[in-house]
Image (cartoon, grey):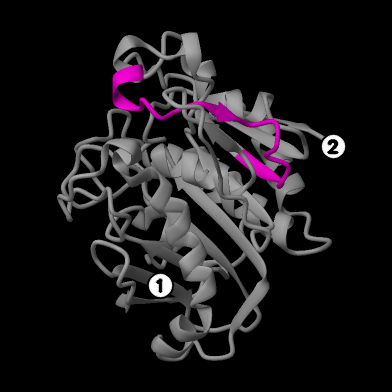
């Protein structure tokens, strides 16, 4: 982490945050799983000080890079969240380009295994805590959130309660995890059926979401310019379906002018970022941090304060919310 904000963070600096601390990053931790094609590698980022630390499970997207769709990606988010009081755990899912594994026909992108990876991590928190120097006794297992980007956002959605009905055979997949108390869905996936493009049907033939059971509180983050014709016949509004089609409480953040990578959250100076902007990244960092603090810490007002600050710099984005 830097000791100061990026010189180009701009008006995002007006979103208030608590003071940062230095971050310790430890990887890889290898969780053995004989039934998995390869063992589960994870990375842990944690603040160097503090106790009773809440936990964020961060699921990477698919993307086109060779490395960022793994535990090596999403440093702009992972280190920022860790610097401000969270322990962030990142797996390398089986779909990672770094593994080059061929997925079974009925498990494209190993999409079913992704949620299982997160459950495995929660089941192994004792071992993870013991493996990271200086982390022993500092985790708060009652405060767990999941965050995910793109395909990782669908992983997060399922852990938050969404279900999938495979249109090919009608099989239903459920991955709801009660230990997860809140979520952040970053440029998530929307409705299927006629809302998918022809290419979308070919890319994700398994995809048939139902967000009506996604009761866990979550923040949905979308870019106003995130038009994805390879997946959907609709515009950027498709990515907000998981907000509109799920029950509350939910919050929605629109990042103005942003595409699918939200200014560069998947990695510093990443080629796959078509809308690179330290200011947008700063906005997403700060707004997601504020949401997570308020969602996991009773009485915390960070989200209200951040939303009020954003109202004064509306050119960067807007928020809305719905209750139960």
Spatial CA distance of label 1 from label 2 is 33 Å
Residue 313 image-quadrant placement: top right
- Which residue is painted at 47% across and 33% down in the image? 187
- 127 lies above or below 189: below
Image coords of residue 169 (percent x, y): 45, 27
Report crowding for label 1: few under 14, some 14 to 19, many 20 or more residues within 10 A (C-alpha).
many
- 315 lies above or below 116: above
Image coords of residue 61 (percent x, y): 35, 43
Image coords of residue 34 (percent x, y): 30, 72
Can residue 59 be seen here? The reply is yes
- 83 lies above or below 204: below
Q: Residue at label 1? A: 44
User: Is 202 in the magenta?
Assistant: yes
- The mark closer to the camera, 1 or 2, is 2
Residue 203 image-quadrant placement: top left
Can residue 317 be seen here? The reply is no
Q: Residue at label 2? A: 324
Report crowding for label 2: few under 14, some 14 to 19, many 20 or more residues within 10 A (C-alpha).
few
Which of 316/45 is in front? 45
- Which residue is painted at 47% across and 53% down in the image? 115
Residue 128 image-quadrant placement: bottom left
Q: In this image, 28 relative to 240: left or right?
A: left
Image coords of residue 263 (percent x, y): 38, 36
The segment highlighted magenta reads 201-219
Looking at the magenta stretch, what is its main secondary structure? Answer: loop
- Which residue is painted at 78% across and 54% down in the image? 301
Label 1: which secondary element: strand
């Amino acid at each position: 982490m830097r000791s100061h904000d990026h010189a180009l963070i701009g008006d995002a600096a007006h979103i208030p945050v608590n003071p940062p601390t230095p971050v310790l990053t430890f990887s890889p931790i290898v969780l053995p799983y004989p039934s998995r094609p390869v063992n589960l590698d994870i990375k842990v980022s944690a603040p160097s000080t503090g106790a009773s630390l809440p936990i964020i499970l961060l699921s990477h997207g698919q993307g086109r890079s060779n490395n960022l769709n793994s535990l090596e990606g999403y440093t702009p988010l992972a280190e920022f969240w860790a610097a401000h009081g969270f322990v962030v755990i990142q797996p390398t899912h089986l779909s990672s380009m770094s593994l080059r594994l061929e997925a079974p026909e009925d498990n494209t992108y190993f999409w079913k295994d992704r949620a299982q990876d997160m459950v495995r991590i929660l089941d192994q928190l004792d071992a993870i805590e013991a493996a990271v120097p200086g982390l022993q006794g500092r985790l708060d297992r009652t405060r767990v959130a999941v965050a995910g980007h793109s395909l990782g956002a669908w992983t997060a959605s399922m852990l938050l309660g969404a279900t999938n009905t495979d249109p090919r055979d009608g099989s239903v997949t459920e991955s709801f995890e009660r230990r997860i108390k809140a979520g952040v869905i970053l440029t998530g996936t929307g409705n299927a059926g006629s809302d998918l493009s022809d290419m979308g049907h070919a890319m994700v033939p398994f995809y048939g979401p139902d967000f009506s059971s996604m009761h866990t509180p979550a923040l949905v983050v979308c870019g106003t310019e995130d038009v994805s014709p390879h997946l959907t016949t609709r515009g950027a509004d498709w990515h907000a379906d998981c907000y509109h089609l799920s029950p509350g409480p939910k919050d929605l953040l629109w990042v103005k002018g942003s595409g699918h990578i939200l200014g560069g959250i998947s990695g510093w100076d990443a080629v796959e970022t078509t809308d690179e902007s330290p200011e947008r990244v700063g906005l997403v960092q700060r707004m997601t941090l504020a949401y997570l603090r308020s969602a996991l810490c009773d009485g915390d007002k960070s989200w209200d304060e951040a939303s009020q600050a954003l109202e004064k710099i509306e050119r960067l984005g807007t928020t809305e919310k719905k209750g139960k």
